[in-house]
Image (cartoon, rainbow, N blue to C red):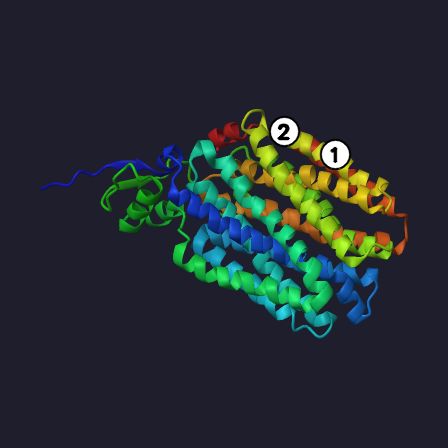
Amino acid sequence: MTQTVRTWNVPARLGAAPLGVQHWLLLALTFAVAATDGLDAQVIGFTAPQIAAEFGIGNDRLGPVFSAALLGMTGGALLFGTLGDRLGRRRTMIFCVALFGLGTLLTALASGITALLVLRLVTGLGLGGALPNAVTLVAECAPARHRPLLITLMYIGFSVGGLLGGVIAGSLVVEHGWRAMFYVGGGLPLVLVLVLLRWLPESPQYLARRHGGGAALARLLARFDVATAYAAHDRYELPEPPARGGADALFRGGRARNTLLLWLAFFINLLVLFFLMNWLPKLLVDGGVPLARAIRTTVMFNIGGVLGALALAWLSARHDPRRMLATFFALGALAIMGIGLGDGRYAAVAGACLATGLFAGAAQCGLYPIATQVYPSAVRATGVGWAQAWGRVGSILGPLAGGWLAMLQPRFAVYFLVFGAPLLVAAAAIAALRDAAAVRRKS
């Protein structure tokens, strides 16, 4: 008896599928990855005052400590974004989570600045590689109408991780010292690795591109699209123009303009945000604010990031996403300047930090749905990885620039006027983006 061979458009089937249990499971797992990533990325800011006191270093030497992990993140985004396209999103992401968990755990054993720098660099490699693959995996599995919301919800995990880290650090660091925070930050992702090995799926689009079909792809598609019966002998297609891998693909098919504008927006926003996450608690402590209260300003920032990301996702579903994102960037610039105008007064600074998270923190979440639309599946993780890598370059320079500025011993307000203004440039870059659907059609 001859078997009927059906042809399936894999992205179209995934895009048209109803939202189901498998989508929520994927969201929960990638949200957990983003949350542990956010906690471990920000843990150095929570512990910096105690580290500086124990190792006897001043503000000028804290810049490299802050930037070591960020340098690793840049390399990790480039390396593991590309490997995610070649080896699969699932295995690459799991390796990255294991790497940053182990690096954070070992940081608790550091006995000097050199060891601290090396371990934070290694940790950063994993931190930088996890999110591009998580974003790509969600984008390639989500139903089309829910894709921006699911990506945003996943990336909110980064802010939630920072929020929980701040809450934990507020008591743990004060009572048990900075090393205890690294034990927590390292242990959580290592436990998560065991969960990911059991439950995390691979991208059906990746399997279709690399293997063409087979029983594994048929079973996976059936989990995301429960109403359709798929067979191993069916034909599975990715009807998109072939895209040769590598960074040069990001500049072909009409993608050059959006690529450069995305890089600029990622660079500026992470430069500003990582300056805030690393330096704000230390600047407040220098101004006489108790450590526990200074840490709580970071909590306010992350609360704002969560609320703002939800608001931005809701608004972007009803209005032009680029216009909404550009508006959030502009309001974020004003909010950061407002931190400086608070002049060290805790209530004013905390309120401005909440607003900064609401707009500038949320804008970082809003960049990812747009980035995933610009690139075809064959280079999607590479595209997101390179955009994030340029963001990581900014995140390296932000803390370093804070250290250079600190050498001039300016007034508290000057830090935030200097770092708030660039977000207006990011707003202009987003406003100048070409329509993502038009870019896809041209590619």
Locate residue 266, reporting x and y percent: 65, 42
Label 1 residue SS: helix
Image quadrant where residue 71 sits? bottom right
The one of 417 and 307 positioned closer to us in this rendering: 307
Q: Relative to 189, does residue 82 appear above or below in the rendering? A: above
Q: Earlier along the polypeptide chain: callout 2 or callout 1?
A: 2
Q: For the residues labelled 2 and 1, say whether their Cβ atoms are less than 8 Å apart.
A: no
The residue singled out by tag 1 in the image is: 424
Q: Amino acid at mark 2?
A: Met
Q: Is residue 243 visible?
A: no
**Above or below 42: residue 371:** above
Residue at the image position 68 percent from the left and 59 percent from the top: 169
Q: How many marks?
A: 2
Q: Nearer the viewer, residue 191 or 84?
A: 191
- The residue pinned by badge 2 equals 324
Q: Position of residue 320 (x, y in %)?
A: 58, 25
Q: Is residue 64 above or below residue 401?
A: below
- Quarter of the figure with the N terminus: top left
Residue furthest to the top in view is 319
In this picture, residue 49 sits left or right of residue 362: right
Q: Is residue 143 visible?
A: yes
Nearest to the eye among marks 2 and 1: give it.
Answer: 2
For numbered disc 2, what is the local secondary structure? helix
**Furthest-bottom residue in view?**
111
In the image, 214 versus 210, the foreground residue is 214
The x and y percentages for residue 182 are 64, 65
